[in-house]
Amino acid sequence: MRRSDKKKNIEKVNLLREQFYLEDRLPQNNDTYFETLGETLDAVQKYAESMGYTLDEEEIMLQFGSGGISYGQTKSVNLTLLKDGQPMLDKRGKPMNRYLHVSIYRMDSGKYELTMYKTF
């Protein structure tokens, strides 16, 4: 193999690694700051759907709907990822630990900062 071919192959591998890393980062569309809590939670649901999962709306409302988030406070929760509306089960029928970890910080300006990642 020629030296120039090796260099091209290395460049291709590096490009693929970079694309994989960028696709796996959260949030995908670089939206980190939101005006309202509703917009923030919509972004969480859209991200879960883009991965092929759904979230339980009751769980979201239970975690974030009651009381909201005070200024300068962070609320972090693990939301269960559902497949076809049901928790995923392993071969033995036990629930798998598939969660979306969501942290929402309410800044003093009133905006919300969203950080989330999948935990599995």
Image (cartoon, grey):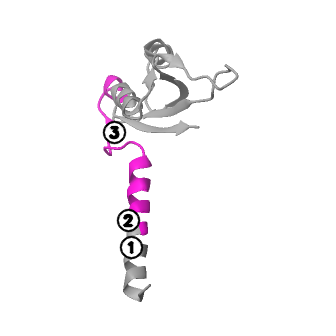
Disc 3 residue type (three-letter):
Tyr
Estimate how packed mark 2 is, as few (under 14), some (14 to 19) or many (20 or more) residues with alpha carbons within 10 Å: few
Residue 103 in the image: x percent, y percent?
49, 34
Q: Which residue is mark 3?
A: 33
Position of residue 108 measured from the top left corner of the image (x, y, whole percent): 39, 35
The residue type indicated by label 2 comes to Leu
Residue range corresponding to the magenta coloring: 13-40
Q: Residue at x 41, y 37 (%)?
A: 114
**Quadrant of res 112:** top left
The answer to whether residue 38 is left or right of residue 60 is: left
Q: Any magenta on residue 17?
A: yes
Is 26 located above or below residue 10 in the figure?
A: above
Tag of residue 15: 2
Residue at the image position 38 percent from the left and 42 percent from the top:
27
Write down the residue under mark 1.
Answer: 11
Residue 73 image point, x, y percent? 49, 31
Q: Quadrant of the C terminus?
A: top right
> On the picture, is 96 further left or further right than 52?
right
